[in-house]
Image: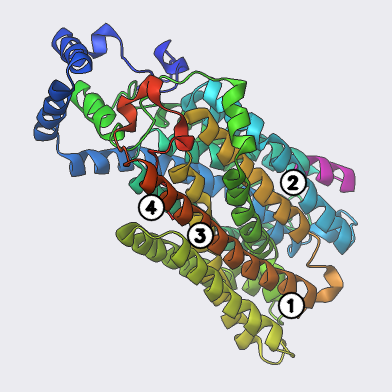
Amino acid sequence: MTAKLSADDSQLAPPTTDQADQPDDQSLQKAKAEQDPASATESIDVEHSEVDEKSLLRKIDWRLLPAVGVLYLLSFLDRSNVGNARIEGLTGDLHMSGNQYLTGLTLYFVGYVIFEVPCNIILKRTTPRFWLPTLTILWGIVATLMGIVQDLTGFFIARFFLGVTESGLFPGVVYYFSMWYKRRERQFRISLFFSAAALAGSFGGILAYGIGHMRGVVWENGWRWIFILEGIATVVVAVFAYWFIYNYPDTAEFLTDKERIFIRNRLAADSDATHDERFTWGNVAKALRDPKCWLYGLSFHTMSLPLYTFSLFLPSIIRDLGYTAANAQLLTIPPYAFAFITTLTVATFSEKYGQRAIPLIGSASFAMVGYIILLANTDPQSRPGLSYTGTFFAAGGIYPATALALSWPAINVSGQTKRAVANGMQISIGNLGAVLGTQLYRQNDGPRYIVGHSFTLGYLFGNIIVSLVLYLILKKENTRRNAITAEVKEVGELHGDWDGDDDARWRFQY
């Protein structure tokens, strides 16, 4: 494996590989297939007999998922560890009020929202191997510098640029998956990838507990070491990422020539990943004009507020139940571990039965139970166990619901550029909910946090409504198209005769 970028790497899944990568007989076979559809089918059958599909999928999973999962774990850790730092003395040392602390959290999402779509456009015009590790190094540096800020202004600047540098990872990886996996395979992989966020919460609690004992080393409190050590770890991992992040199937070094052809054939069954689509602003406009793309964004919008208020304020919520800072750090671990389990369980159910809206609605409803418990407990400090139980319901519903919401455009939007922009739009629109959420859990609202918990409960209910609307729209559109023309799954073979998901031969998943 090498980090050197070739000319082929600069293209997004080009339709052919170099002469060295594709023997002459395969080139002739492909040309023959283009002239004779029957021979194309025969070629695919030959490849199916020579390549074990399940083994190849496992091979791809092991090469892709751990690599990008580690980057997302670091991303979520570096954005949410501010909640752990807060109860280790951050606000006191920087002489900030609780509301000023909330402003710092908000600025992160301002930077995040602004640069979502531009980052995905850059990914489209460069390569994953270059762009994803570079982003990780940049946010790792910013995260490290947060540990040496001396005043409120420095904290504000650092949080803003942390949002800017982290903004391209998640939508970029979702788009990246769409160039490797068939539609029906993406949702499960996105959920596995997103489950790293729950693991980050667990690791964050463990690390914050351990690093908190460094109070008195150089600085009186240990919060600076949380940022510095975790930020340095991010930079170190990112440097190695230039070697363990791959580009696209046609240039991935771990694949054989036969496996590359096989992947192209299987993606052609239901995907546009094999199209030689060049970037155009017209394709960007297609996403902006599509109401469904805005609804995908609204689906995540109604989950991002619960997601980020939970991850940013859980340490404070638990501490305000009457626990010490150290114990509060440890008590954040079990809810996140439970969220990891429920995310994988719901993803497996969704994958097995081909359902998207129903498990999403069920997960959001499960999270609503948690916030009803938190609101119903009128004396949390006398009954901390009841409120702590509510955090399990909240975590166990929020994370799988968010993973499902985020997978919808990846499986339903056809057209490479349109899908890249739709993914960026979804995260941008979604994180506007997080902007609002950062202002809801104010310092004097604990331990019940009525305003914050109530807004979160309302947003979860809103997600159920949006999911139902999307379900009905997509189902109705599929019914309309069924009356016009049959579904064409061999999208990859259409090339010039394909208008993305606007084509009546495309079917949506709901």
Determine which residue is flagged by label 3.
472
Q: Residue 124 lies in magenta, yes or no? A: no
The kind of secondary structure element at disc 1 is: loop
Specify which label sits upstream in the sequence, 1 or 2: 2
Determine which residue is flagged by label 1.
320
Q: Work out how far the residue at label 1 is from the one at label 4, CA to CA, in angstroms.
A: 36 Å
Determine which residue is flagged by label 2.
108
510, 347: nearer the viewer: 510
Residue at x 38%, y 42% (from the top left corner): 484
Q: Work out how far the residue at label 2 is from the one at label 4, CA to CA, in angstroms.
A: 29 Å
Q: Amino acid at mark 2?
A: Tyr
Proximity of marks 3 and 1: CB atoms separated by less than 8 Å = no
The kind of secondary structure element at disc 4 is: helix
Q: Work out how far the residue at label 1 is from the one at label 2, CA to CA, in angstroms.
A: 25 Å
Specify which label sits upstream in the sequence, 2 or 3: 2
Q: Viewer-nearest of labels 1 and 2? A: 2
347, 499: nearer the viewer: 499
Residue at x 45%, y 66% (from the top left corner): 358
Q: Viewer-nearest of labels 2 and 4? A: 4
